[in-house]
Image: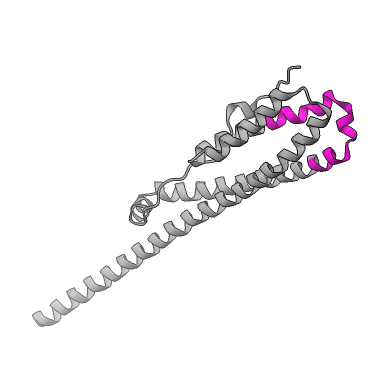
Amino acid sequence: MSAGRILLMVFGGLLILILMLGGCVYSGYNQAIEMDEAVKSQWAQVENQLQRRFELIPNLVNTVKGVASQEEKIYLGVANARKAYFQAQSVNDKARAASGFESALSRLLVLRETYPQLKSDQSFLKLQDQLEGTENRLAVERKRYNDSVRVLNTFIRKLLGRLYAGLAGVEQAEYFEIGEEARSTPKVEF
């Protein structure tokens, strides 16, 4: 074998190796981008359901106000929690604000036990059903979001995933976690 032929084989082998490595990097880079977009898309769905919830609440509050006008503290809690959500910047801040809102909302819904006329008010019952459906959709979207975050974060924690994510500028995402106040049973004081 001549030296030229050996040199050609070495360069050919190196070229094939470089192309294979380039293909792996290209594939991993695209995979990181796709996972990041999936997380962003799922978060948009969570926000979509939160927005639906926030649109239903003023109607529910107004219906309850007509029957239980002296519960100003509860109405202010709902309004302040809603405001905190819209002022939040990060996913975790929004999750904490949404959790605070859930706590305030549960205190509002407990009023139906105190005011029996709410149990028979058709507009209240309709709004409550819509809110319940929204809460169910929100729970599904939160689960899907957290599943997407798990897939992305697992990918990034793997050896080459960290490299690909770094090249793509993709960082680990934050899980949507509920706050402590949403885990406890609401206490309504009259």
Q: Residue at x 32, y 68 (%)?
A: 20
Residue 177 visible in this rendered orientation of the protein: no
Residue 166 visible in this rendered orientation of the protein: yes
How far across and how far down the image is residue 138, in percent? 66, 45
Observer-nearest of 48 and 22? 48
User: Left of 96 or right of it: where is 168?
Assistant: left
* Residue 53 sits above or below residue 99 on the image: below
* Residue 74 sits above or below residue 1 on the image: above
* Quadrant location of the C terminus in the rendered image: top right
Observer-nearest of 139 and 51? 51
Q: Residue furthest left?
A: 3
* Residue 76 sits above or below residue 153 on the image: above
Magenta highlight on residue 125: yes
User: Left of 137 or right of it: where is 151?
Assistant: left
Q: Residue at x 19, y 77 (%)?
A: 9
* Quadrant location of the N terminus in the rendered image: bottom left
Identify the image quadrant of residue 7: bottom left
Magenta highlight on residue 3: no
- The magenta segment: 104-127
Identify the image quadrant of residue 79: top right
How far across and how far down the image is residue 122, in percent? 88, 40
How far across and how far down the image is residue 56, in percent? 72, 43
Magenta: main secondary structure: helix
